Each structure stands twice: as C-alpha cells, then as structure tokens.
Amino acid sequence: MTIDWQKEVDARKDALLEDLQNLLRINSERDDSKATPEAPFGPGPVAGLKHMLAYGERDGFVVKNVDNYAGHIEYGEGDETLGIFGHMDVVPAGDGWDTDPYEPVIKDGKIFARGSSDDKGPSMAAYYALRIIKDLGVPLSKKVRFVVGSDEESGWGDMDYYFKHEETPDFGFSPDAEFPIINGEKGNVSLYARFGGSSEGEYILESFNAGLRENMVPGTATAVITVPTAEAAEKMQGAFSVFVDEEPISGTLEANGTTVTIKVVGKGAHGASPQSGINAATFLAVFLNSYAFGGAAKEFIQVAATLVHEDFYGEKLGVAFEDAKMGKLTMNAGLFVFKKEAEEGNFMSLNFRYPKGTTAEDLEAGVKATAGAIGATIVQGGRNQEPHYVPADDPLVETLLQVYEDHTGQKGHEQIIGGGTYGRLLKRGVAYGAMFPGYTDTMHQANEFMALDDLFRATAIYADAIYRLAK
C-alpha cells in the first residue's frame, strides 16, 4: 500500500493546529498543594490529560482514563502492542516570556507556548498520525496504544500507577526528544545536599531561593542578607556592580538599612544540558562566598560556590565519569532553598545524568567525600533511573531510522542523550523526534516554541512509522 503521508497531514493542518492551541491553553504544571484523589498531581495535569483523552473519544478511538493518573487512546487488534508515550504535564513557565506562556502565539512560522515542544506539540503530531491511520482504515496486525501521561516532568508517578493497572506494550517510542532517534538514555538520579544548624556570623543569610524543578537550570536566584552596617551594605552594592559587569549575568541589589536583597538573572535551560544555561544560583553563591557568613549558611554558600558552580561534569564534586558510547556524566544544580529560621531542611538538589559504568551509589559516595567534608549531609532523593540502551540493530531502531531517511533524505544514526523520556519505560523503547537536526532547543526555557513545518513533517513521519511497525 502506497500512501502519501505528507498529503494526508496537509489535509488536516488546520484541525491539528486548532487542537494543539486549545491544549496549550491549559496550564498543566504540577501543583502538589492542590492535589486530591481526583487530581493526583494537581488540577493542571489532570485537565491536560482529560483534554487529550477527549480528542480520542471525539475521533472514535477506544479510550481509557486510568484514575486520572494517565490514560490511553487505542486502535487496532493484535497479539502485540505498539506503545506511543506522550505527556501533558509541563514544567513551570518561569520568568522571561515575551508573551503569555498559556496563550499560544503563532509568529514567524513558530508556535510559542509552554509545552509547545515538550511535549504537547510532539504528542499532538503522534496523535494525528494515529488518527490518519484510523481515517484511512489501514489494516494493521498489531494494536497501537497511545499512552498519555501527566507527571513526566516530576516523579513519573503517573507511569508507576499506570503500569500497575494496565498491560505493558511490547515495544514503542516516545515523541519527546529529537530525530533521527534516541536509542540510549543516561541514568538519572538526584542527590540532595542538606544543611542544618545555626547560621550565626558577621553576615546573616536570611534566605536564599532559586529554581523551579530539579531538571531545570535556575534562571533567577534571590538572597536576603543582614549586613553589619549601612556602610557595609553600600560597599556590597559597589562590589556587586563590578561582579555583574564581569560575569555573564544581570541583577539588582537593593539595600534598606542593613537589609540587602540581591537578585541574579542567568539563563534557564533543560537540566540534561546544564552547560547550555547560566545558573543564577551558583553565580549568586560565588558573589556571597567572600563575605563572613557562619554555620550552615557558610557551608551552603561554600558548597554552591566552590563545588557546584559550573561543575557541569562532576569534576569538582569528584564524580566525573565518561563512557565511550554514552559520553560524559552531567550534573545540574536545580533547586536551592535556605531559610535562617529553619535550621533544618535547607538544601540544594544535584541532578545527575550518568552513563553506564558508574552507579547512583558511586555518585553518592563521591559527593559525600567532597560536599560532605564541607558540612553537607548527602541523601538520595526520588527514583534512580539506570542507563537505558536499545541496540542499533534492533528491528525497532532499524525501522524508525529507515522511515526518517525516507522522509528527509538524511542518513539516520543512533544517539544517546542525558534527557530522560518515557521511551525508557519499555525494554524495547526509544525516543523518536519531534525535533529535527539543527533545531533551536527551547525546552524548559522562556519563549518555548515549535516550528510549524517541523510539527507537520513529524506528523507524516509518525504516521509512516506507525504503519510500518504495526502493519
């Protein structure tokens, strides 16, 4: 059967774009403060989930909502199941947007909104690909299940719940990365450096806050400090002006008597590529490290300034590691919380993307030896996802690369990334698109966008891929 997949996509462009815009208008950030049994990750993620599943019901698919954690849209019959995994939750919008992050704007051939490229745009491309298969009545020998998640950007509690109640697909892909394919993903684990005790000193750190998620480079950071005298505040203001001029940041320092408030602005980025961002928190710590703080505040600032600052590959922390196939370990310091009155619970998160050959236990031991020596208590937080790899000669990988080559005329090749996708949920699972080589990566950043040409081209590739994998 010969099908002009791009022609089929072109006939549905307007409908696809309208459905995507309506989906992007939903603020689907996780909000634990508003979580309920009916909204396990807060009202936003479940609203996005239900909205996506409603498209499936509208278009005549078999649809199932699994207790508002996740759901699926299903088509076809067969003994094997091809799984496609997308997610409706998004990271917090953060600051720095030129437009409302939840009112999509189309400009210069791009659609701007939080979730446009991660992962509502690619998910909509995969959904419309499946819809094309259904519309055409293409005969399949396998079942196709589009699984819709709602907690990918946080703890993956959605998939933990889903797989306790639903069968696991035999193989599949997640439209949540880039072409030509991602058939390997580094391990993913977070360590928390905790600081307790009093913070008495000549300078008092009242508070220090930065970051929105472990997997985002903090674009802004704020500290409130009590200094010894008004003259000391004035001197700090002069020193900060020089610091800002010399470093790749901007910021403000406001003094009110002996109370000083400093805000640093860097550049947010995806935590899987911390070197592409400018961590506002660690730059702020570098500035503060020359002042006479005491106790827990001194330890907190010193660890951030001397061990974490620009330590993208874990060298200062003593855990650097590289594998010939998977590449270097990377580290992102994503969350910083300090309150003087707390004395307990002050912390910074260190998110590692690590290749095969090292382990979470190795990382924890290494960080204990370095940051622990300064006064931090090191604990592992959340899940540990071990490195994942599907061989290049697996029929799944070979088929997807052939589809990519046929549609683009470009040679396909395997890739391994630090980012974690739902592709790793399956032993024979990969990530596939929707970003094309040479794209501008705006995931987890302000002014996130997806190029419309890429959106439509990816849809045609997904339709052909589903057909070849399930025919």
Image: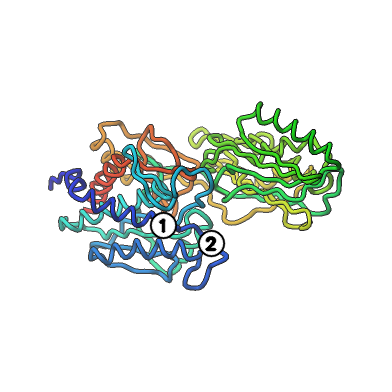
- Residue at left offset 66%, top offset 31%: 244
Residue 300 in which image quadrant: top right
Find residue 254 and report its horizontal and vertical position in percent.
Answer: 71, 41
Q: Secondary structure at mark 1?
A: loop
Tag 1–tag 2 contact (CB < 8 Å): no
Q: Secondary structure at mark 2?
A: loop
Find residue 214 and report its horizontal and vertical position in percent.
Answer: 58, 49
Nearest the eye: 127 or 284: 284
- Residue at left offset 80%, top offset 33%: 235
Find residue 140 and report its horizontal and vertical position in percent.
Answer: 20, 57
The three-letter code of the residue at mark 2 reads: Asp
| Extreme residue in the left direction | 1
Q: Which mark is residue 322?
A: none
Find residue 306 and report its horizontal and vertical position in percent.
Answer: 73, 36
Nearest the eye: 467 or 68: 68
Placement of 227 over or under 239, stated as above or below: below
Q: Which residue is mark 2?
A: 31
Residue 249 in which image quadrant: top right
Q: Earlier in the sequence, mark 1 or mark 2?
A: 2
Which of the two discs, 1 and 2, sits closer to the camera? Answer: 2
Q: Is residue 185 visible?
A: no
Placement of 79 over or under 243, stated as above or below: below
Q: Which mark is residue 88?
A: 1
Q: Is residue 269 visible?
A: yes
